[in-house]
Image (tube, grey):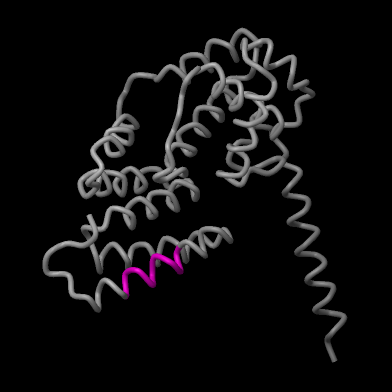
């Protein structure tokens, strides 16, 4: 819906401005500020479905799934596109979908760790929220399952040959590559990504420590 009754033009303009700023913060990974802007937007124009969906996306990216689900509930309530609303309603289903079933079956067959299977399922949940209003086409569940598997392996530094994994799932290498690139770009996935890395020692911790040390050294260097 474009805007609810009782919402003034001034409030709508404010909500639109806050939403735009939220999207910019979301893109730069300043999730605290993004969530804050989206909350203001939803409060100012509570019947605008897009603002609730953007709030859910930011909360999910930050790992706050409880509040992301609440925001999705508000989104479904206000979404006028019934097919799109139904797609998100499926996220509340307790049963596994075909992608998750395939993913679990194949990753178990490959003797992947339970934590990595969980990371792949989490990635699928986050992707379906993060795409927002973009269409989600699932012609073969194996294609998405393979892409999730492949991406989680890459995050966790497994040696994996893409065409061999594609053959394992019974799909083409090009299809696997396309879906993998979509996951990486939509979720902004990086090597050793904290959201999906399951190892004990994350190498990103050392980079953070090194950056902090460098900052301290620079501060000392600039002291009078």
* Front residue of this view, candidates 219 and 30: 30
Q: Quadrant of residue 201?
A: top right
Give the image location of residue 127, x and y in percent. 49, 38
Q: Identify the residue at horizontal 42%, vertical 37% (top origin).
A: 135
Q: Identify the residue at horizontal 62%, vertical 14% (top origin).
A: 171
* Front residue of this view, candidates 224 and 204: 204
Above-or-below relation of 46 to 104 = below
Above-or-below relation of 60 to 125 = below
Side of 186 relative to 137 (left or right): right
Give the image location of residue 223, x and y in percent. 83, 87
Q: Quadrant of residue 142?
A: top right
Q: Quadrant of residue 45?
A: bottom left
Above-or-below relation of 187 to 86 = below
Side of 134 relative to 215 (left or right): left
Find the residue positioned furthest to the left: 6
* Front residue of this view, candidates 34 and 184: 184
Above-or-below relation of 105 to 74 = above
Give the image location of residue 143, x and y in percent. 56, 20
Residue 18 part of the magenta segment: yes
Give the image location of residue 24, x and y in percent. 51, 64
Magenta stretch, main secondary structure class? helix
Identify the image quadrant of the C terminus. Answer: bottom right
Residue 32 part of the magenta segment: no
Q: Identify the residue at horizontal 31%, vertical 38% (top origin).
A: 84
Find the residue positioned furthest to the bottom: 224
Find the residue positioned furthest to the right: 221
Q: Identify the residue at horizontal 31%, vertical 23% (top origin).
A: 94
Identify the image quadrant of the N terminus. Answer: bottom left
Q: Which span is picked out in magenta?
A: 14-22
Count of picture labels: 0
């Amino acid at each position: 819906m474009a805007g609810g009754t009782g919402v003034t033009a001034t409030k709508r303009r404010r909500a639109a401005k806050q939403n735009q700023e939220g999207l910019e913060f979301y893109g730069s990974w300043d999730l605290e500020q993004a969530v804050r802007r989206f909350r203001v937007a939803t409060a100012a124009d509570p019947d605008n479905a897009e603002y609730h969906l953007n709030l859910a996306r930011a909360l999910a990216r930050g790992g706050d799934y409880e509040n992301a689900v609440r925001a999705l509930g508000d989104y479904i309530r206000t979404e006028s596109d019934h097919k799109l609303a139904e797609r998100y309603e499926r996220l509340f289903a307790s049963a596994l979908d075909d992608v998750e079933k395939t993913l679990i079956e194949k990753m178990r067959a490959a003797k992947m760790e339970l934590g990595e299977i969980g990371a792949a399922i989490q990635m699928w949940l986050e992707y379906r929220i993060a795409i927002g209003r973009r269409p989600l086409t699932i012609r073969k569940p194996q294609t998405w399952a393979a892409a999730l598997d492949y991406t989680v392996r890459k995050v966790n530094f497994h040696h994996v040959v893409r065409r061999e994994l594609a053959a394992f799932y019974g799909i083409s290498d090009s299809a696997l590559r396309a879906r993998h690139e979509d996951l990486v770009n939509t979720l902004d996935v990086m090597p050793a990504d904290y959201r999906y890395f399951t190892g004990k020692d994350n190498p990103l911790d050392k980079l953070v420590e090194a950056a902090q040390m460098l900052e301290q050294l620079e501060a000392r260097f600039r002291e009078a």
